[in-house]
Image (tube, helix red, strand yellow):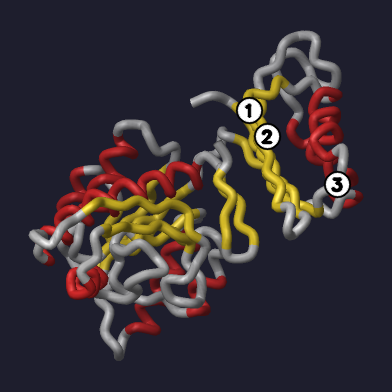
Amino acid sequence: MRNSAVLLIDCPDRRGLVARVAGLLYEHGANILHADQHQDHELGLFFMRVEWSLDLPGDAIKSAPGKFDLETFKTDFAPLAAELAMRWTLTASARKPRVALFCSQYLHCVADLLYRWRAGELDCEITIIVSNHADVELMAAFYGILFVHIPVTAATRKQGEAYQLELLAKYDVDLIVLARYMQILSADFVTRFPAAIINVHHSFLPAFTGARPYHAAHARGVKLIGATSHYVTEVLDDGPIIEQDVARISHRDQVEDLVARGRDLERMVLSRAVRWHLDRRILCYGNKTVIFD
């Protein structure tokens, strides 16, 4: 993976924003690898993603040859951000995000993520797998990842969630991926990880929310089924949507056919969402997302 930094910005739109940011990066000798921006004209908002190399040539202005001084840039950028009312994050590729996978008895999504991680497609550290069932234990052992079984009942839900939070803090988790975790997280849990819990829903949201969307889709006689990856919020199945995909079906397809075809969609939309998050390509605003190229 390349040695780079990524700056994500959102702020009120005005003239000259791109020039101001690019000019400061130029003063620090940055070699910009990728830049993308978006304007929401109705709301008057501006969004930007800039990625640049942290390996510099010898003619860099404010850095020693071969090294971009990220802390100095951050100090110099803060007044500009304050002046332009920017919300911003600055991250370097040197620190890989630490990820926890939550799953239940359906293992197709977690298996796909683990394979892609081992193949180098997901630039992160998967530190722990948590499940309310023991089915994933052998898979976790195969990949050398800590597995923790936390059964969930109505009587133990609060204690189980407290233990989950303890584990997430212990292993310094940045991102939680609900890879078909069939339990509802409490509002207290969700608010501790804003825009850092990704779920896959086996439906093309906002249609067919709830636990049995393929049965509902079959009963309705739809001709397309879909899957949705989204950030988790306190409102069930209502968080900012990251990715969706669909497959065409017909009157000949039964519920079992919809479930089987839906699993492929679930794997794809979840892996894309996780990869885009890890690559720092997503900005949330309101209940929407900007996904940068």
Classify residue 140 as left or right of residue 204: left
Judge depth for marks 3 and 2 and give the one in front. Answer: 3
Query: Which residue has dot 3 on it?
Result: 14
Query: Where residue 34 is drawn, which disc sits there?
Result: 1
Where, by quadrant of the figure, is residue 122 drawn?
Answer: top left
Asked if one can make out residue 87 in the rendered structure from this viewpoint, the answer is: no
- Amino acid on which disc 3 is placed: Arg
> Looking at the rendering, in which quadrant would you find the C terminus?
top right
Q: Residue at x 85, y 46 (%)?
A: 14
Query: Which residue has dot 2 on it?
Result: 50
Classify residue 188 as left or right of residue 229: right
Front residue of 281/62: it is 281
Q: Position of residue 291 (x, y in %)?
A: 55, 46
The residue positioned farthest toward the top in the image shown? 58
For marks 1 and 2, the one nearer the N-term is 1
Front residue of 124/238: it is 238
Q: Position of residue 135 (x, y in %)?
A: 15, 61
Q: Residue at x 12, y 62 (%)?
A: 251
Asked if one can make out residue 6 in the rendered structure from this viewpoint, the answer is: yes
For marks 3 and 1, the one nearer the N-term is 3
C-alpha separation, residue under disc 1 versus residue under disc 2: 6 Å
The residue positioned farthest toward the bottom in the image shown? 155
Tag 3 secondary structure: loop
